Every structure is written in structure tokens, then in C-alpha cells.
Image (cartoon, rainbow, N blue to C red):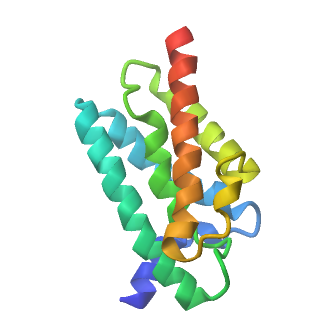
């Protein structure tokens, strides 16, 4: 079971990428985000994203203990399980552009960690691994809505 959780945490191998493992790992979330766009009810979209985020916490926490170190770069479940948040409520847009902007914005905010994300870097365990990606996804969601409402 531990190996299965680790396999999920590393994005089925994507997190072992020698180049930009977080970005490569986030790609695993694109099919999930695409599927979420097909869910008609925004309430269900929110519920699904809450469940995915809550699942990411123990997955990442367990993998961190198995792999060792604080928030190892190969753990990418936090990235790909929070990516779908960036598209909540955006069914009316062009799917490719919605997914692309959500992906890019999520990565920008996860990498740069603007306030208040940076202030949360001291939190340990699965929650600490996931909370910055969750907030990055929420900021990306807000900007995604701005972008697609203005266009």
C-alpha cells in the first residue's frame, strides 16, 4: 500500500522528471481538470475539488515520510490534484484556453509563492505540502475568471 501511495504522490512517475518535476507533475492534472469542465453543476465542481484537495493531504504526507525530507520535489500530487480548482465555473469558455491559462497561472503562483502563500512555507506534513498549491490554485481561479469574463 505504501508503494501505491508513493506512486500516486509522484504523479505515476511524472515527479521523477529530471527537469521541472513540479511542472511535469502538474500535467497529470490536466485530464482531471478537463473532466471537471464537463461537470454541469458548479456545486459538484467545488465538492470534487474539495475531495481532491483533502485526498492530496494524506497522500503527500505519507509520501513525504516514505521518501524523506521536507516537501520533496518529486511529490507532485499537491500540484495535479489542486490544478482542477483553476477551472471551476468556466464551462462556457474555450476548453483548451481555459486549461492552458489555469495550468500556467497555477504554476506561476506555485513557483513564485506571493503573499500569503510564502508565509505558509513553515507548515509541515501533508497539509503544509498542499496548502500553498491550494492557494495558488485559488488565485489562478480568480484570474482565470477575470480573463474569461473580460474576453
Q: Nearer the viewer, residue 30 or 73?
A: 73
Name the quarter where the N terminus is drawn.
Answer: bottom left
Q: Nearer the viewer, residue 107 or 115?
A: 115
Q: Quadrant of residue 81?
A: bottom left
For the point 32% across and 42% down, the residue is: 46
Name the quarter where the C terminus is drawn.
Answer: top right
For the point 31% across and 57% down, the residue is: 51
**Position of 10 compared to 43: left or right?**
right
In the rendered image, is residue 109 in sight?
yes
For the point 60% across and 87% down, the residue is: 67
In the rendered image, is residue 39 in sight?
no
For the point 53% across and 30% down, the residue is: 142
Location of residue 65 in the rendering, given as x and y in whole percent from the top left corner: 54, 88
Location of residue 62 in the rendering, given as x and y in whole percent from the top left corner: 47, 83
Q: Is residue 98 above or below residue 109?
A: above
Location of residue 143 in the rendering, given as x and y in whole percent from the top left corner: 58, 27
Location of residue 29 in the rendering, given as x and y in whole percent from the top left corner: 48, 52
Q: Quadrant of residue 125?
A: bottom right
Q: Is residue 122 above or below residue 68?
A: above
How many marks the image carries: the answer is: 0
Amino acid at each position: 500500500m505504501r508503494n501505491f501511495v508513493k506512486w500516486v504522490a509522484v504523479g505515476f512517475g511524472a515527479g521523477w522528471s529530471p527537469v521541472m518535476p513540479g511542472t511535469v507533475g502538474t500535467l497529470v492534472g490536466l485530464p482531471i481538470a478537463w473532466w471537471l469542465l464537463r461537470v454541469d453543476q458548479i456545486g459538484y465542481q467545488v465538492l470534487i475539488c474539495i475531495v481532491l484537495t483533502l485526498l492530496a493531504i494524506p497522500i503527500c504526507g505519507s509520501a513525504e515520510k516514505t521518501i524523506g525530507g521536507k516537501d520533496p520535489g518529486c511529490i507532485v500530487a499537491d500540484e495535479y490534484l489542486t490544478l482542477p480548482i483553476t477551472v471551476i465555473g468556466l464551462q462556457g469558455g474555450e476548453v483548451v484556453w481555459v486549461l492552458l491559462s489555469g495550468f500556467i497561472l497555477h504554476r506561476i503562483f506555485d513557483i513564485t509563492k506571493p503573499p500569503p502563500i510564502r508565509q505558509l512555507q513553515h507548515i509541515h506534513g501533508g497539509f503544509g505540502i498542499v496548502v500553498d498549491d491550494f492557494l495558488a490554485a485559488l488565485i489562478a481561479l480568480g484570474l482565470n475568471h477575470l480573463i474569461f469574463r473580460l474576453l
